[in-house]
Structures are given as C-alpha cells and as structure tokens.
Amino acid sequence: MDRGDGKKAGRKRITARERRKILDIHIEDPRLSVRGIATRAGMKLSTVYKILSLFKDGKIDRDGFQYEKPLCL
C-alpha cells in the first residue's frame, strides 16, 4: 500500500456504532464475560477489552463516543 495513492495503512478504526454495540451488550448483562461479549458482538476479544476499559475509565460515553479527557473526575 502506498499512502501517496490515497490508501490508508494500518488497522481499521472502530466506529461509535461498533463501540455502542459492545456497550449495549455489557449494560444489558454486566455479569457477561469479555469473551461472551466478544462472541455476541462478533469482534475480537482484545477490541472488546479495550472498549470496556475505556468505558470504565470514563473516556467513552454510553453512546460510544470517545473523548480525550475523562468525562468525570
């Protein structure tokens, strides 16, 4: 891939819609394991873990939008 041709290199970004899907599953059943959420959402375990960690740190809201600074201190 050549970036000069207008192609993007690297991993695809996780959209707010995908983050919200994971958070909806988590909020629906908080006792569900990360592996269970990943299976239901059809995503990788590491992706789900990262999103849940950001949510618990307050860097993602319930709608899946990501912020640089925590939402609450």
Image: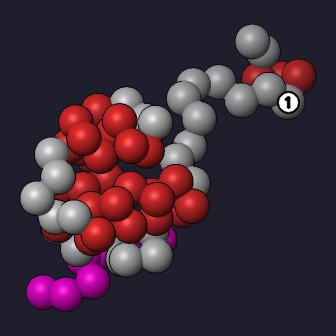
Left or right: where 60 falls relative to 64: left
For the residue labelled by badge 1, is the local secondary structure a helix, a strand or a loop?
loop
| Residue 63: percent from left, percent from top | 46, 76
Dot 1 corresponds to which residue? 6
| Residue 37: percent from left, percent from top | 29, 46
Mark 1 belongs to which amino acid? Answer: Gly
Residue 8 visible in the picture: yes
| Residue at (27, 70) in percent of width and height | 27
| Residue at (24, 41) in percent of width and height | 36
The residue range painted magenta reads 65-73
In the image shown, does 44 or 41 lie closer to the viewer?
41
Q: Main secondary structure of the magenta part?
A: loop
In the image shown, does 5 or 56 lie closer to the viewer?
56
| Residue 25: percent from left, percent from top | 34, 60
> Which quarter shows the C terminus?
bottom left
Q: Is residue 71 above or below residue 48?
A: below
| Residue at (22, 36) in percent of width and height | 35
Residue 47 visible in the picture: no
Left or right: where 24 falls relative to 49: right
| Residue at (17, 52) in percent of width and height | 32
Left or right: where 37 falls relative to 16: left
Q: Is residue 52 above or below residue 44?
A: below
Say if the magenta span includes residue 20.
no
| Residue 24: percent from left, percent from top | 38, 67
Say if the magenta span includes residue 66.
yes
Total labels: the figure holds 1
